[in-house]
Amino acid sequence: MTIMKRIKMLRDKFGKIVEYIKKKKFFFIALAIILIAGGSYFIFKDDSTATSQYTYSTVTKGNIVNSITESGEILSTGNIDVTSTISGTVGDVYVNNGDTVAIGQKLFYVTSTATDEEVASAYSQYLTAVKNYNTAELGKKTLEGQIESAKQSVYDAQDAVDEKNEKVASGENNPKTNEPYTQNEQNSIDAALNSAKISLESKEMELENYDQSLAASSASLKSAKLAYDATQDGVVTSTGEGIIQNVSITTGDTVTASGSSQTSNSSSTGSTSTSSTSSTSSSSSSALMTIKTSSEVWLKTEISEVDIQKINTDQSATITLDAIADKEFHADVERIDTTGTNSSGVVTYNVYLKMTDATDEIRPGMTSTVSIETEKKEGVLMVPNAAIKSYKGGKAVQIQNSDGSVVYQVVEIGIEGDSFTEITSGLTEEQTILTSNTADNTTSATSSQSSTGTMGGGMMMGR
């Protein structure tokens, strides 16, 4: 069969199919409508077998706490770690564990092992530090005198301006020329006042720089004095009152000098060759013994500018420490900074707390988590925070009627705590409420109850 004959046969068959469809067009239209309707049914039908899974809660009475939680740091403890101010060999040790000591009492003697060259070098650096400090102090006193003179120049220039203004206003002459004030004379008097003010401001700024220079010279002097003391034989004495603990030295031991440090609420003075470098903060070398004192344990936390208005002295706080697991301590807010610190655009304020149940385990520098109670109510009606919904401009909870329908119950709320919200009206104790609901075809979990019904009382909105 030729190709032309095959094409003619296919054309004839296609024509017959078209004629058949034209004759049966109403049948195919009806079939299309049925298919569309069926698809819509399966897409949009309501699954009557779905069951709403509700989580229930009971209105109870209890205590609600609102708190602010931040990280903190232990600043000082009731322990003084005693180190040596002298590098050398331990001679006599005058105390034992359990002894009670007073400020200035002898603890142990150290013979320096410094060479003559080391002693001479340390003494030379000390003398240089003394000279630099004296120079800075003299410069500050000189500048303070210049500032007083500059202030007097401002006063005199201001008097001249006031006199000029009065005479110009009344039409009087310049007393120096016995002629009316020229514009140049007026400008000159005004300029003299501005110049005097600029000179005063410049010297006051210079004084601030001198204060910084003097502080640096003072620190250098103390450091040089400690370094020189470390080369001299001497007795290390107690800087606090308390009970000796953890004595770890004996005659013949070698010790290294360690400078004292300072905390924000208690300072330690620079030591001499006969004083202790003990302090309430951690030192750069191991403690040779510890003095247990009656000092308080303090810690510091930083509160944001958003929350600082909620913090007041005498508020209670709970403390947990990373280094001491499974223990909770307590503290009271004692002091709040009024000037904030700006770090990368974030302003925070230091808050200082005193611990009320500290133990010997706590050490300076330990990291803590501080939760400060800002508001607390006891014996009030309360519900979980998740149960509170926004409803018609107010607050409401959901309750389930006996027929299974869920409706909104308008409530008035008090304080909102970390987990619970106070109910001041609208509910009664032991009343059952809903905290959440989901639609599912599976069986409810044991912690939930299953019920079907329609949502009533308006659309649920996020809190």
Image (cartoon, rainbow, N blue to C red):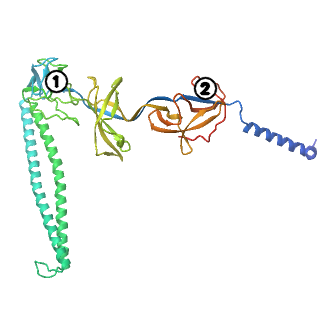
Write the residue at 28% across / 42% down.
Answer: 337
Asked if labels 1 and 2 touch by Cβ distance under 8 angstroms, the answer is: no
Q: Quadrant of residue 34?
A: top right
Crowding near pointer 1: few (<14 within 10 Å), some, many (20+)?
Answer: many
Please, what secondary structure does the residue beneath circle 2 have? strand
In which quadrant is the N terminus drawn? top right
Amino acid type of the residue tagged 2 in the rendering: Gln
* Residue holding disc 2: 449
Q: Quadrant of residue 284?
A: top left
| Spot occupied by residue 64 in the image (x, y as percentages of width and height) | 43, 32
Residue 107's place in the image compared with 399, above or below, is above
- Taking depth in this image into account, of 112 and 425 the one nearest to the observer is 425
| C-alpha gap between disc 2 and disc 1 | 63 Å
Could you tell which of marks 2 and 1 lies nearer the N-terminus?
1
* Residue holding disc 1: 242
| Spot occupied by residue 152 in the image (x, y as percentages of width and height) | 12, 62
Residue 235's place in the image compared with 261, above or below, is above
- Taking depth in this image into account, of 222 and 330 the one nearest to the observer is 330
Name the side, left or right, on which 365 lies relative to 14.
Answer: left
Q: Quadrant of residue 99?
A: top left
Crowding near pointer 2: few (<14 within 10 Å), some, many (20+)?
Answer: few
